[in-house]
Amino acid sequence: MMMKKAVFTALLSTSALAAFGVHAADTELNIYSARHYQTDEALYGNFTKQTGIKVNRIEAKEDELLERIRNEGANSPADVFITVDVSRLAHADQMGIFAPVKSALLDERIPANLRTERWFSFSTRARIIVYNPELVKAEQVQSYEQLADPGLKGKVCTRSGSHPYNLSLGAAMIKHNGADETVKWASGLVDNFARAPKGGDTDQIKSVAAGECGVAIANSYYLARLMNSTKPDDQAVVDKIKVVWPNQHSWGTHINVSGAGMLKSAPHKEAAVKFLEYLASDEAQAYFANGNNEWPVVASVKVDNPALDKLGKFKADSMQIGELADTVAQAQKIYDRAGYR
């Protein structure tokens, strides 16, 4: 498991619990994070500057961190769990690790559809459609539903159907269109694959630019990275594709989130709430937008990001983000039946 320098190696021993105990409640905060973005270093550093609270952090994959929390039980030194994608946050919530947080500041700053009683969204990203105009017409790919149309046979690329990004999209499809229609959609999508799902979202975008596929689904920040890149190869990719905000005439483009919650067993609950509130501050929200090409959840925060500015405004799905948890498992079953793996 990867560990950041700020985390004592003593965390691996039982004696670590004393180092992370309640005696340092106002001076330390222990974060388990599944976000792996270098720009997040500024978030933690500035929180410490503002509050004097030292941040100790472990970074690893979501499943590893959740298993660690499960094994540590009531003695876990973790105060806050941070991850990306609503399906992962929902899974953590279903494990019962999060504690309810009452904060007037969080209620005021974070839109109601982007928070629950126990975990909060701090940035958003959109599930966009990218297409090659030499292979696909714009009117063919204006919605997620159209990706299953027979006219796109052999032209669709995606990453694995088991990936949380696609599971959350499937969960949203179920909520909006019903399970039966989502079954038909998943089957049609698989029938239209140009190749078996593989790679990440950047790979899908590059495959569209190369003509291996006519159209693909990707998270917006992957495209924004390419758009902001100074590498000629990346700019060549951007020049060959076009972007669609899906479902602008129906329920809106599916969005996903980065989010966090305080653990029930948190030894530093006061510091944990302070950190969650800090993530909703103008300063922290700007880091999400400008550092990792995500949108802040606080609408008043100004974004200084050329790629996001160029992508422009769009109609986002306004569904209560916590509701997607109800249908993530169902989406996985539908994908499995359709052969979307």
Image: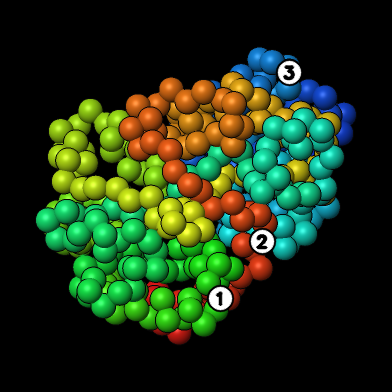
Give residue 49's position: percent from left, percent from top: 66, 15
User: In front of the other: label 1 or label 3?
Assistant: 1
Look at mark 2 in the image and give the residue it sits on.
323
At label 1, which amino acid type do we have?
Gly
Q: Nearer the viewer, residue 60 or 39?
A: 39
User: In front of the other: label 3 or label 2?
Assistant: 2
User: In front of the other: label 2 or label 1?
Assistant: 1
Give whichever of discs 1 and 3 has the lower sequence position.
3
In the drawing, does residue 212 fall left or right of residue 21? Answer: left
At label 3, which amino acid type do we have?
Thr
Visible in this render: residue 13?
no
- Tell me the number on the disc at residue 51: 3
Name the residue furthest front: 249
Give whichever of discs 3 and 2 has the lower sequence position.
3
- Residue at image location 46% in from the left, 68% down from the top: 162
Crowd around label 3: few <14 · some 14–19 · many ≥20 (10 Å): some
At label 2, which amino acid type do we have?
Glu
- Tell me the number on the disc at residue 45: none
- Cα separation between marks 1 and 3: 47 Å
Crowd around label 2: few <14 · some 14–19 · many ≥20 (10 Å): some
Compared with 94, 242 (above or below) is above
Dot 2: element: helix
Give residue 340's position: percent from left, percent from top: 39, 75
Quarter of the image where the C terminus is located: bottom left
> Disc 1 vs disc 3: Cβ atoms closer than 8 Å?
no
> Disc 3 vs disc 2: Cβ atoms closer than 8 Å?
no
- Cα separation between marks 2 and 1: 14 Å
Query: Number of labelled discs?
Result: 3
Give residue 7's position: percent from left, percent from top: 62, 34
Look at mark 1 in the image and give the residue it sits on.
178
